Amino acid sequence: MAVSQFVSPHQVEFSSESTLMSSETTSLQTLRQDWQTRWAAMPPRERQIATWAGWLVTVTLLVLIGIRPAWRILSETPAQLRDVDVQLEAMRRLADETQVLRQRPPVPPAQAEAALRSATERLGDSARLNLQGDRATLTLTKVSGEALAFWLDEARGGSRAKPIEAGLMQVEPGQYSGNIVLVLGPGSGGGR
């Protein structure tokens, strides 16, 4: 009986990989031996220059890769800390303002409507206020961002109205059009 020998593709791959690895190892050993032979053949002065050059390259790489990025981070940190402190202070101011608004007593509906109408009249013909029950809808046409911010501040402070929906679009630089829906009444002023 003849026994056939079967070689799987995996064995062929493994065999080629091991041959490749052994040739790489041999090649590295050959390079190392060549380098040692050249090093031994060099005059002492050239060996000293090569050693100093190697140290110089090593120190340069250490500085460029290890020390310089860390130094840059350390130099940028104070500016980043100042920015974070400014943001933290702004958040604290907003939190304080929120607390003050929450502690204000609710405004009666008639007074809230009057305050909203008064604030809207200051916007002129570019704003129209529509009141329906406990909701107010402000329709804006080309209102400046500064005037809109002032109106929102006055609406929130004077009438205790709370914006619940806004659909604004910048139609020109600094000019906005769209709608803002506010809720009026005791639930919109404080305690939430």
Image (spheres, grey):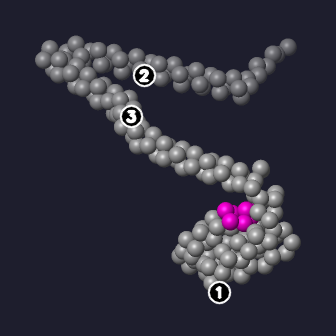
Residue visible at 74% across and 25% down in the picture: 8
Disc 2 marks a residue whose amino acid type is Ser
Q: Secondary structure at mark 2?
A: helix
Q: Earlier in the sequence, mark 2 or mark 1?
A: 2
| Pointers 2 and 3 in contact (C-beta within 8 Å) | no
| Pointers 3 and 1 in contact (C-beta within 8 Å) | no
**Which numbered circle lies on residue 74?**
3
**Residue 141: percent from left, percent from top:** 65, 82
The quadrant of the rendering that contains the N terminus is top right
| Quadrant in which residue 101 is drawn | bottom right
Q: Earlier in the sequence, mark 3 or mark 1?
A: 3
Disc 3 marks a residue whose amino acid type is Leu
Q: Secondary structure at mark 3?
A: helix
Residue visible at 63% across and 65% down in the picture: 153
**Residue 12: percent from left, percent from top:** 66, 26
Q: Which residues are magenta?
A: 156-162
**Residue 148: percent from left, percent from top:** 61, 72
The residue that disc 1 covers is: 125
Q: Does 126 appear in magenta?
A: no
Q: CA distance from mark 3 to mark 1?
A: 55 Å
Residue 183 appears anywhere in the view? no
Residue visible at 81% across and 16% down in the picture: 3
Q: Earlier in the sequence, mark 2 or mark 3?
A: 2
Residue 4 appears anywhere in the view? yes
**Residue 43: percent from left, percent from top:** 14, 16
Residue visible at 65% across and 86% down in the picture: 125
| Quadrant in which residue 134 is drawn | bottom right
User: Is the residue 53 above or below the residue 29 in the image?
Assistant: below
The residue that disc 2 covers is: 27
